[in-house]
Amino acid sequence: MTDWDEIVESINRAMEAVSKAHNASQTLQQDANHNTFEVFRRRMKELEDHLQRLKRVLDNEEAFAMDELMDALSKVYSGHAADHRKTPRMNL
């Protein structure tokens, strides 16, 4: 899977996290207690984590794009991904 595929997958996971956080918010509004608040807090933390990963990529999108291009060229000419990268490999 390429970095870009992982970015797209990460965006999908973030959108799913938004939905889960929204559902937890509605549940909290209907029945405010310690358990529903804890679920809401956990869902918001998951959403925050997804958005931080996306922000890191978007803040450095040119570097990620160049590394992705170098990986593709390296695979064509040497059969393996480039040894050096300016950005970390995506493990979202």
Image (cartoon, rainbow, N blue to C red):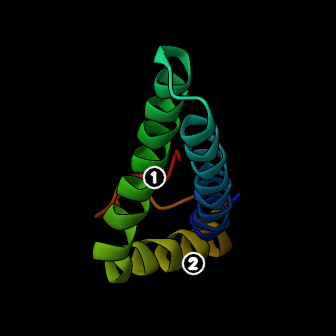
What's the residue at 54%, 16% (across, down)?
A: 35
What's the residue at 40%, 48% (across, down)?
A: 48
| Residue, disc 2 | 73
- Residue 84 picture quarter: bottom left
Of callouts 1 and 2, which one flags the residue occurring earlier in the amino acid sequence? 2
Is 32 placed left or right of 26 in the picture? Answer: left
What's the residue at 47%, 61% (across, down)?
A: 82
Q: What residue type is labelled 2?
A: Leu
Residue 18 horizontal/vertical position (percent): 58, 56
Q: Which residue is most to the top?
A: 34
How much space separates mark 1 and mark 2, taking CA atoms? 16 Å
Which class describes the residues within 10 Å of circle 2: few (<14), some (14-19), or many (20+)? some
Which class describes the residues within 10 Å of circle 1: few (<14), some (14-19), or many (20+)? few
Is 16 placed left or right of 32 in the picture? Answer: right
Q: What residue type is labelled 1?
A: Arg
- Residue 59 picture quarter: bottom left
What's the residue at 68%, 66% (across, down)?
A: 5
Nearest to the observer: residue 7 or residue 38: 38
Residue 81 horizontal/vertical position (percent): 55, 59
Please tell me whether mark 1 sits on a helix, a strand or a loop.
Answer: loop
Residue 53 horizontal/vertical position (percent): 40, 54
| Residue, disc 1 | 89
- Residue 45 picture quarter: top left
